[in-house]
């Protein structure tokens, strides 16, 4: 694992800034805790279905944020693992 991951949370561990694939000047804040994304697809399709108790297909931005969170969380926990140095010494 690198010293610092390539992508970091936006303003809290569950909020991520994800760039639009179709417009390089746009980005969306994804909140994994709510869950919520600022993109049009989420606002018009996903959000209303979630409020009705349905389980819609989530937007790409949400999946990207979730993957980045997982990578970041593994990195953060690995940094705090007291066994990490011990394990390296035994190799």
Image: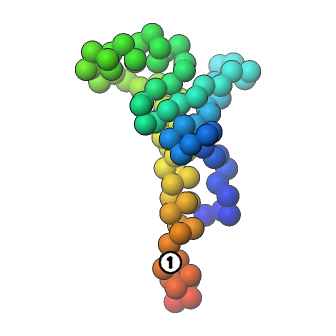
At which x and y percent is residue 33? 43, 36
| Residue highlighted by disc 1 | 82
**Within the image, what quadrant is residue 52 found in?**
top left
Q: Residue furthest left?
A: 53
Above/below status of 81 relative to 46? below
Q: Which residue is situated farthest in the bottom direction here? A: 90
Residue 15 vs 87, above or below: the answer is: above
Question: Left or right of 15: which side holds 52?
Answer: left
Disc 1 secondary structure class: loop
Looking at the image, the residue that sits furthest to the front is 11
Q: Position of residue 68 (x, y in %)?
A: 55, 45
- Please count the marks in the image: 1
Q: Is residue 91 visible?
A: no
Badge 1 density bin: few <14, some 14–19, many ≥20, Cα 10 Å: few
Whether residue 2 can be seen here: yes
Quick one: 26 or 29, which is closer to the camera?
A: 29
Residue appearing at x 40%, y 17% in the figure: 47
**Residue 60 placement (x, y as % from top left):** 50, 28
Residue at 60% x, 43% y: name it: 9
Q: Nearer the viewer, residue 56 or 81?
A: 81
Q: Quick one: quadrant of the C terminus?
A: bottom right
The one nearer the camera, 89 or 77, is 77
């Amino acid at each position: 694992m690198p010293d610092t991951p390539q992508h970091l949370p936006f303003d809290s561990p569950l909020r991520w800034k994800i760039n639009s694939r179709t417009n390089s000047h746009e980005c969306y804040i994804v909140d994994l805790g709510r869950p919520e994304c600022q993109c049009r697809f989420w606002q018009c399709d996903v959000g209303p279905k979630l409020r009705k108790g349905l389980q819609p297909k989530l937007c790409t931005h949400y999946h990207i944020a979730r993957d980045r969170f997982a990578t970041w969380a593994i990195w953060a926990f690995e940094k705090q693992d007291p066994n990490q140095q011990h394990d390296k010494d035994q190799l």
